[in-house]
Amino acid sequence: MDNYDDLETRSPEAREAALMAALPGTVAQAKEKAGGFGDILAEVDPVAVTDRAALAALPVTRKSDLIERQQAVPPFGGLAALAPGETAHIFMSPGPIYEFETARKGFWRLERALFAAGFRAGDIVHNCFAYHLTPGGWMLDGAARGLGCAVIPGGVGNSEHQVQAIAHLRPSAYTGTPDFLKVLLDKGDELGLDCSSITRALVSGGALFPEMRQAYADRGVAVLQCYATADLGLIAYESEAREGMILDEEIIVEILRPGTGDPLPEGEVGEVVVTTLNPDYPLVRFATGDLSAILPGTSPCGRTAPRIKGWLGRADQATKVKGMFVQPGQVAAVLKRHGEIGRARLVVTRDGDSDAMTLQCEVETADDAGLIAAIAESLQACCKLKGAVEAVAPGSLPNDGKIIDDQRSYS
């Protein structure tokens, strides 16, 4: 078996002992160097945090609170252990949420996921995560180069130019969202350009549906997925066994009952909460808002780290559409621009192989084309994604507080 390093095959007991040994130092770093955590952990003695029971007694910090926290204490909400000028890149994700990376080697630790997906030194990687302001492109770019690969910085859009580059440069691997690889392959077919050099892919930022994975396999592309965030780096990744997602070696993961700090037993679906061992960004009990569950046993591939089922939806109402988070606050911003709207709900579905979103709005004048067009423009401006607008009768939407309704199936 080919592994990225020996950490992947150590005994579960050795792994747990190493993580728990590192935990007090992480808590101390967060408390002493990050002002926000200094407040959150004010009553905590880091030396005493030596096991999961002690960790479970600490407060949870939620990603969903980052917008408010960062507005109060710019730019990183007091959670970073260094000054903004000591970072290497500063990013702005939709929300807005501000993230960063430093020059620390393997800052996001995505090399491990690339290796498991078959990427090797000397490969040419066509990277189609976005580079402009958002961190995705840089995350995979740095990891691929750290692994010894060359990178084509494709980004998103410009599919015709991208397939011209693929046909000429012959990359062997793709990184990007699951949907965009199909866009490129179809564009190559349309233009009569050969994109068959791509035989491996690591995707993230959206759901990899079984039929989509099989369609790629039919075209000779083996696709695996990983689960990562710009705050935490790599959380979990698939191996060739494709039985769950294997947790990264340098984080501590808990599955909590949504809305609480209480760990759930193996197999129960709950919120993914992560403690990192990154001294630059020592996040302690950072709640992602994502749902998953710990699987029993270990992977047939021989890696011994715990596994999760993968992404099973959102614990809060935020969701990913075409790889971008859409937050309830962004939908609320649309409503503020248009006083004619009563209740509204953003419905997220699948349209063929792509995500689609429709903003259902209660309005008195359902046939006002100008208003509908204006709302659609506001939706794109606030959410950074195009969506349809559907006028519905006043009082027809449920009074249940739901702003985003994700109707996609992940089973």
Image (spheres, helix red, strand yellow):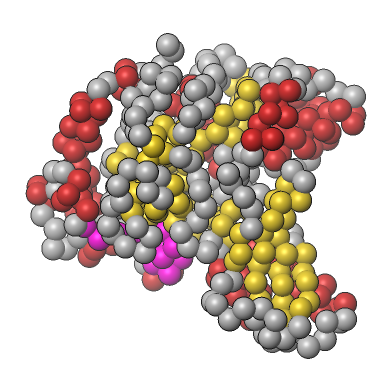
Image spot of residue 336 (x, y percent): 63, 81
Measuring 20% from the left and 46% from the top, which residue is drawn there?
52
Residue 353 among those drawn in magenta: no
Magenta span: 58-70
The total number of labels drawn is 0
Image spot of residue 187 (x, y percent): 84, 33
Task: In the displayed orientation, state which residue is furthest to the right.
Answer: 191
**Residue 36 visible, this orientation:** yes
**Residue 78 visible, this orientation:** no
Measuring 66% from the left and 67% from the top, which residue is drawn there?
346
In this orientation, which residue lies closer to the viewer: 101 or 10? 10
Image spot of residue 166 (x, y percent): 75, 24
Look at the image and tell me in which quarter the C terminus lies.
Answer: top right
Residue 68 among those drawn in magenta: yes
Look at the image and tell me in which quarter the N terminus lies.
Answer: top left
Image spot of residue 104 (x, y percent): 37, 35
Vertical position of residue 239 compared to residue 326: above or below? above
In this orientation, which residue lies closer to the viewer: 400 or 28? 400
Q: Is residue 233 left or right of residue 190?
A: left
Q: Is residue 273 left or right of residue 35?
A: right
In this orientation, which residue lies closer to the viewer: 227 or 336? 227
Task: In the displayed orientation, state which residue is furthest to the top.
Answer: 1
Magenta span main SS: helix
Measuring 73% from the left and 23% from the top, which residue is drawn there?
218
Measuring 58% from the left and 81% from the top, which residue is drawn there?
399
Q: Is residue 3 left or right of residue 280?
A: right
Vertical position of residue 157 compared to residue 223: above or below? below
